[in-house]
Amino acid sequence: MIINKLEPQGFCKGVINAINLAKKAVNDSNIKKPIYMLGALIHNEHIINELQNLGIIIVDQKLKSRLELLDLIPDNNGTVIISAHGVSNKVIEKIKNKKLDIIDTTCPYVNLVHKRVFEKINEGYNILYIGQKSHPECEGVIDNDKNIKLITNIDDVKDLNINNDKIYVTNQTTMSIYEIDNIYNELKNKYKNILIDNKICMATTERQKAVYNTDNVDLLIVIGDIRSSNTKKLAEVGKKKGINTILVDNLLDLKNKLPNNINKVAVTSGASTPDFITDEIIEYLKTI
């Protein structure tokens, strides 16, 4: 079997920073214990389990917002880790009101989006944000102001009716660079003076371009957690290009999904996928 390991691979800088801060806190006697993690630090179950084994208490429930999850944490006792996805100012304020300390692991790219959105609100712009409704990064931005309008697809653009000449649009950092271009083009056609600020992060962009530029393979293997937006977008790019694509979480998952009669594969991984999982899968593929 011929194996093409697409680059880049491994954790992005934002993920590395978040994991390091969380692990450092466990062994820091100056950090108030217990330590609570508000939602998933990153979207990878292997890392979440590792942090939980270190003693960090995971506070996460399906369909609950970060603001709602805070109600599950006792007041006046401990520290809350904010995930790499970031949170709204409402969440920060509520943590402080509960007399809890904060460890903020928000990705720098996400912080920049928050900063720009607040700047444009103060300058009188209508704010549009392209993202996934259920994603915590999206939640962290749009919950800052009730007037921020969420755009999830082109149909949402068609439904817009904005009279303000000052319109600013930005996006979730882990969207598909190809999907989002269509939405931006639709917005430019509708609002000629719209200010577009594309904030897809470099780690996401480079990985998606590597997939898009891949040719002559029987199969694309995308490695990562199904909850990871940037991982799912890698699989979507592959499928839209017409490549036979599977998304797997680990070696066992691969063995259950790997088709027969595959001679040439390309392998990529999400920005929150540990190297050891990718390495294990590639070593297995070499035996076939």
Image (cartoon, rainbow, N blue to C red):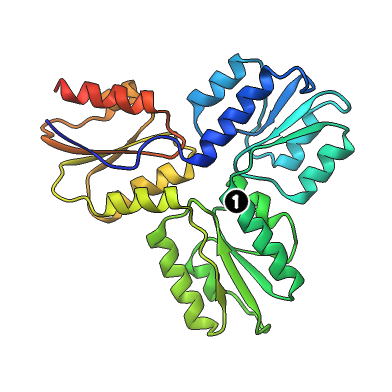
Using the image, determine if residue 45 lies above or below residue 202.
Answer: above
Where in the figure is residue 232, as x and y percent of width and height? 41, 44
Q: Is residue 84 above or below residue 113?
A: above
Q: Which residue bears the numbered disc 1?
A: 110
Query: What amino acid type is highlighted by mark number 1?
Result: Val
Q: Residue at x 68, y 23 (%)?
A: 25
Residue 286 left/right relative to 206: left
Q: Give above or below for 156 relative to 256.
A: below
- Say which residue appears at 44% left-offset and 74% top-offset: 185
Instruction: Using the image as rendered, state which of residue 259 and residue 44 is in the foreground.
Output: 44
Q: For the point 88% across and 32% down, which residue is it?
A: 99
Q: Residue at x 46, y 40 (%)?
A: 12
Q: How many marks?
A: 1
> In which quadrant of the rendered image does the C terminus lie?
top left
Indicate the position of residue 167 as horizontal and vertical percent values: 63, 76
Q: In this view, does 151 lie to the left or right of 184?
A: right
Q: Is mark 1 on a helix, strand or loop?
A: helix
Classify residue 25 as left or right of residue 234: right
Residue 37: name its quadrant: top right
Quadrant assignment for the N terminus: top left
